[in-house]
Every structure is written in C-alpha cells, then in structure tokens.
Image: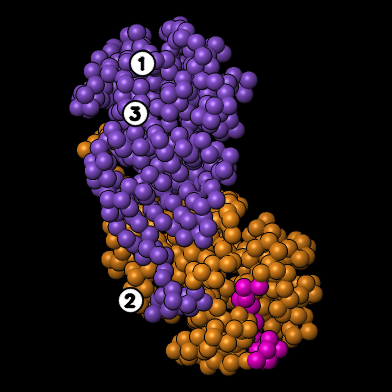
Chain colours: A orange, B purple
Amino acid sequence: VSVRLVGGADLKRLVARVGAAEFMRQLIAELAAAYARWDEFEKMARPATHVPGGVIELMPISDATRYAFKYVNGHPRNPEQGYATVVAIGMLTDATNGYPLLVSEMTVLTALRTAGTSALAARHLARRPSRTMALIGTGAQAEFQALAFQVECGVTTVRAYDTDPAALAKFARHGRTLGLGVVVCGSVAEAVTGADIITTATAAKARARILTDALVAPGVHINGIGGDCPGKTELEAAILSRAKVVVEFTPQSLIEGEVQQTGAAAIHAELHELVRGLKPGRERADEVTVFDSVGFALEDYAALMLVQRLATQYGIGQATDLIPDLADPKDLWSALH
Amino acid sequence: VSVRLVGGADLKRLVARVGAAEFMRQLIAELAAAYARWDEFEKMARPATHVPGGVIELMPISDATRYAFKYVNGHPRNPEQGYATVVAIGMLTDATNGYPLLVSEMTVLTALRTAGTSALAARHLARRPSRTMALIGTGAQAEFQALAFQVECGVTTVRAYDTDPAALAKFARHGRTLGLGVVVCGSVAEAVTGADIITTATAAKARARILTDALVAPGVHINGIGGDCPGKTELEAAILSRAKVVVEFTPQSLIEGEVQQTGAAAIHAELHELVRGLKPGRERADEVTVFDSVGFALEDYAALMLVQRLATQYGIGQATDLIPDLADPKDLWSALH
C-alpha cells in the first residue's frame, strides 16, 4: 500500500517524456471523458477557509472508484514577497477503500488542466478554423493556454498584451519556443484585432472591464479564465448579454465567474452539456461565444487520473510510506515498534 | 520552499527519538495549548463525501498563522480485505501565504492525538488518583489510550475486554511492554470492576449498549471514543442523563457522538471550557463523568504542529518539491522546462 509521490521534478520529467503537446492532447481527452461522465460524480461546493491575506480551499470530488481533492490557496499579495499567488497539492485515492494512491504537485498541473479545459470548451465553441488568438494577460497561465489552443484548435499566432512589459517579454520568448508566432501588442484593442479567439487571463482583482463589448467582433470565441472569485471579473456585462455563455458548474460560477454580473439567465449551458451533446455549442459563424471558466474539481480529478496513469506507465514518482502496511489491521501500535 | 514529508518510518523514528511517553506528554501539552486558544480558530464542519462502502472526510481548521487539514476515510468492511478501516494523511500549511509546510502520515498520528485528547479530558474529569482503567475494545486504539492514561493519570493497571480473543492477546502483549499490569477479562462487567476510568473503544457499528448504566459505579470517569459517527454509539443513554458529559465541539458531537441519543441538554461543557477554566470539570468524588469523544480538527492541528516542531528539531523527514520554486512568480511555465 505505497502511495506515489509526484513532485515538481517528476511532473517535469513526465511531461518531457510524453512531450508537452502530447501530454496536453491526452489531458484534453481525459477532461472530455470526465465531463462526459458528469452524472457519475458526487459534486460539492469548495469548502473555503478565509485566512489573513487570502483564502484556502479544498476541492473534493468522487465517482464510484476514485476520490480526488486539491488543496489550493489564493493570496493576492504573495508576489510582493516573492511567492506565487496560488500553489496547490492534489491527492487521488481509491474510493472503494479510502486508501490514497497519489500525492501530486498541483501548481503546474492546475495550469495545465485549466488550459486543457479551455481547449475542450473551445472545441465546442470556437469557429473553425481558429488560427489567431488574442491573449490578454501573459502571467503564469499564458504559455499553458497557448499550448492548449495550439494543440486543440491549431492556433498559429498569438497576439499578446499585458500591462507588465516583463511578463509580455517572458511570454513572447516562451511562445516562440512553442513554434507560435507571437505579436507583442500595445493595447487590448490592438491584440484583439483579427483574433478568432480572445483569452483573458489577467489578475484583475476587482470588477474590471478588461474587455469591452465594442472590441468583440462577430464570431469571436472568448475564453475568460481570469474572473475566478467573488468580486473579480474581466468582461463587460454587455458581452455576456449578447453571447452564448458556457460555464462549468452553475452554482459555483454564479459566485465566482463572469456570470456573477448577470445571474443564471445569461448562461446557455454547462460544459458537460456540450460534451454530452445535450445542448449545442457554436451554431452560427457570426455568434459570439464565451467560456466563463472558474475551475472545477472534476478537472483536477481528470488531471490526477492522467498523472497517475502516465506515472505508472513510465515508472515516474517515488513510493512513500504515508499509509501504514499492517499485517493485522487491529495492531496499529506495531507501526510504531 | 521545500515541503517536509513525514512518512510512517519517519514518525516511528521521531517517536523513538523522543520516547513514546515523552512524545505523548508533549502531545497532551500541545493539545491543551490549542484548546486554550479555542476562540482563535476558524472551525467548520467536516465536508464528508459518501463513497461506495464508506465515507471520506476532509477536516480543515486554521488560526492566524497555520492551516491544517486531514484526509481521512472510514470503510467499515475494509478489514475483510486486509485493509485498515481508517487511514489518514495530514497537511500543515502557512496560513499567511498558503504554502504547505508538512505532509504527514496521519493514521498512527490520529491514534496518538485521539488518546492525547482523552488524557487531556481526563485531566479535568477523572478522580485522583486513577490507577485502574477498564478498556472495553482492544483494537487499533487500545495501546495508544493505555499509554496516554499511563502518562497523564498514572494508570498502572488496565482491565481489558474484547469480543475478539486475538485482539485481547495483542493488547495484553503490547500493554505489558509499556510496563502496565494487564488483566484479561471475560466480560465487560468483569473489566469495569474497581476501575477508576472506563474507556470504550469498540467498533460497534450501530446503536450499541456496550456499557450499561448498572455497570457504572459512582465516581467513575468514562472515556467514550468508539461512538464517532451517526448511528454509532456505545453507552446506554441513562448514563448520559446522570453523568457530567463533556464533548469537543457541540454541533459535530450532536451528529456523531453519544449525545446523538440525548441532544444538547445532556452536555455539561465543551472540552475547551474546562481547559480554559470557564466551566468546572469534576466537582465531587462520587459523580460520574463522560468524555464523549468523536475527534476534532483542532486535535489534528495540534498533532501536526508537534510533528513539524520535533521533525525540524531532530532533522527527521524528507524535503520534497511538491511546491515549485519560482524565480519569477509569473513564469510558471519555466517549472516545466
């Protein structure tokens, strides 16, 4: 009963072994498979604890055979001390006996699964072809989003804008190593010009209007990933009113997503309804679509399932004795002697 | 930003380094200190997920500087497959920035903290001296309870009874290595004869009456640790009616504890009220007292704090890269390259 530990170096090795593009492809497939089984999961709100300077959440979910949860924080002022705003650790366990299987680094994995989920939504919502993506906000999520849209939609050019020139330069450097054309832009308006897809991934801390309705051309798909907690939004409400809006899990999105500006009436569908064919995705070339992403525990489940499968396949990770191996379950004392 | 991992072998080494009795002494002190700061903690109900064959819970708690949580399952039929009914993993994090500090084995640590909490309650509720403890149920918790009462109350003799002769023999063997006199008894009635303290630690799965009112002599302290989930109790309700009953956290105890039989009216105090001197513990030599223990997240917090302190002091545990070390918090992509 050894528990596998996948640390940061292990995940890096695993992604390198499979290849970043292939890892993302498999992750999107895993996400699609999980969303297709939506009804099989026991879903719950994230139990949040408010601590000085931030919030700490536990995000659990389970089906008949696996239970997954993620520990994740959000401390907006962390960067001032040189710390990341968000870090995470995930765990996958055997639901049938409660025994943990995997403890994993999940800071990077969360960025990967967020991008994979964006790509899955775009599969149903973006027009074909979508070669050009505007990327508003080139922070920690940027390259992951670029990779996911390159893999899923065949994006070849990213028109990037950020208020922080250093973050913009960082993305341009990494984006080009992905084989993408990166156009560094001086404004949101410049970035969205001619874009098929607009991804907003800013760290706007309040009700912001990073993207105004006037800038959204017919037929564009908006992938909004930066509005992800109460009081934090990126899109002008008018966009939501005229667009086909898709969310992950309505009760959570109404609290944390862009739709906290509009209420449930603005929601066209939940992502699983598109994946399962219960509701249409894009129907017209000229309609505006929005994926209002806040992140959901099911996505962590899918990411942990993929890591566990690949780590087993390639022998990556370390065996730990986090769970005792007892010859006699009633003799726990023997574990100390 | 390395996260310390304390596995089973690490905890064993740590307890051996300090000595089991001294570890328990320090743990009781840590528990007392935590309960004395009761008002400083953000407490919440345990988010439970029902899975096939059992339940999985996350137990979070925090104060201004530390956040702790435990992953713990309960699968009653696990022993049939050779697995423990309950296993656990704990995590301690820095609440001020959300960064994890410690991931720890917590199956054994939970048994230690449960016993330590029982001893802390007995400090306020058991008569002095208490030399003889009856132990009804000699499963996984038994030796931990015996150690805690030896350390805290000076118990020298344990009168043990279990329906499973193998479990009874196991306890007798281990108990004697602790320097305790162990009297193997043939019935509950025999075990409680002359006992100052009665500890019930059975795995009774339904409303059981392991201990009936007629068997409880005046002046006895009852340490009830086996009634710990809805529908699972060990004590005849009449005992609760005439005894001074102390619980950990009323909202949780009303659902999971012995007091689910009686309601809040039977509760004299919460443990922190005794620790803080807000309500009296034992007042008369002939009164019957009950600690109705179900386990509370604060106890896991105290146990994890102790492990983190001792592990740091003795250099025990392993540094992991579960959290990325980023030169630039906006350059998460670099963690993969």
Residue under the point 38% across and 44% down: B306
Residue placed most toward the observer, A335 or A244: A335
Label ID, residue B130: 1
The percent position of residue A97, horizontal first and vertical second, equals 39, 44
**Residue B278, relative to residue A287: is it above or below?**
above
User: Is residue A46 visible to the viewer in this orientation of the structure?
Assistant: no
Give the letter of the chain under mark 1. B
> Where, quadrant-wise, is the C terminus of chain A in this rendering?
top left
Give amino acid for label 2. Arg
Residue placed most toward the observer, B187 or A35: B187
- Judged from the image, the secondary structure of the residue bearing numbered disc 3 is helix
Give amino acid for label 1. Ser
Q: Residues within 10 Å of mark 1 (few under 14, many from 20)?
A: many
Residue placed most toward the observer, B180 or B73: B180
Label ID, residue B148: 3
The percent position of residue B95, horizontal first and vertical second, equals 51, 55
Q: Tell me, yes or no, whether the two marked residues, 3 and 2, touch with CB atoms within 8 Å.
A: no
- Judged from the image, the secondary structure of the residue bearing numbered disc 1 is loop
- Seen as rendered, the residue at the extreme front is B277
Check disc 2 and report the residue beneath it. Answer: A17
User: Is residue A206 visible to the viewer in this orientation of the structure?
Assistant: yes
The percent position of residue B119, horizontal first and vertical second, equals 40, 27
**Residue A228, relative to residue B42: is it above or below?**
below
**Residue B328, relative to residue B176: is it above or below?**
below
Q: Nearer the viewer, mark 1 or mark 2?
A: 1
Q: Residues within 10 Å of mark 3 (few under 14, many from 20)?
A: many
